[in-house]
Image (cartoon, rainbow, N blue to C red):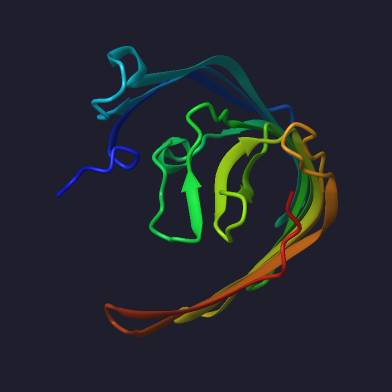
Amino acid sequence: YVPDYNLTNDFNLDDVVHALYANYQNKLSDKFGYQVGLRAEQAYLNTEYLSYDPNLAPEDRSAKGRLDYFRIYPSIYLTRELSEGSSLQLSYTRRVNRPRGWQVNPFLDISDPVNYRQGNPNLKPEDIHSLELAYSKRFGKVNLTSSVYHRITNDVVEMIVDSAAAGTNVTYSTFRNISQNRATGVELISQFTLNKNFDFMANFNGNYQSFSGSEEYGVDANSGFNWDANLTANGRIAKGLTAQLRGNYMAPRVMA
């Protein structure tokens, strides 16, 4: 066997997160309550790509990457009880969505001979700001929750597809941070308990998304409507025996 040094390497990843958080919950009256939270986070993502190619100089066999960032994540929830079994909640949260290990691994995956894929060790996490107004109401055996929301995602992670080589049909895909996405939508969740042996839950989520695009990577701005829905039914057949039926539909997606 003769080693192929383009496909023989080592990748080390060190993902470290130090965090401190606190939540405080109280009521201003019998019907009005609030909760505030704050999370401080210091995160590091250290990577090292090592080649085994003996034809390379020792100083060229290693490529190191480092991400170092400090962020504050606040959250605010205001809840108003309207009547027995119904409430209204207004919330703002800031969240983080970190890339997966295979999204930052620079090893070139050629298992599909016409679609090559490679991770990006310099990928930054997505930064998400969410504002939501939710209403919940119980109607006997039916529990209904509806919400409208607006979310802003910075440093959106998207897979960029390009040609791997001129004159071939092989594509090359990698992950990049491409500016911003804004989504405004509505979500409906209903839970119905028929009896002690049968219940089901239905969910619908629809939103209008607007991607800013990226001039650097040749990605145009794009926008459109997305929606998905699912239904889950649970049945108790006998003591210690249950069954679940689940259906899920995702409409065609509008992407960057």
Residue 13 % position (x, y)? 35, 28
Q: 12 or 128, which is in the foreground? A: 12
Residue 216 % position (x, y)? 75, 31
Q: 197 or 51, which is in the foreground? A: 51
Residue 36 % position (x, y)? 65, 25
**Residue lying furthest bottom:** 237
Q: Can residue 197 be seen in this view?
A: yes
**Residue lying furthest left:** 1
Residue 180 % position (x, y)? 76, 35
Q: 38 or 126, which is in the foreground? A: 126
Residue 177 drawn above or below residue 136: above
Quadrant housing residue 102 = top left
Q: How many labels does the image show?
A: 0
Q: Which residue corresponds to the image point at 82% horizontal and 39% vertical from the top-left?
A: 212
Q: Which residue corresponds to the image point at 58% horizontal and 61% vertical from the top-left?
A: 169
Q: Can residue 81 be seen in this view?
A: no
Left of 76 or right of it: where is 16?
Answer: left
Residue 255 drawn above or below residue 4: below
Q: 12 or 61, which is in the foreground? A: 61
Residue 59 drawn above or below residue 90: above
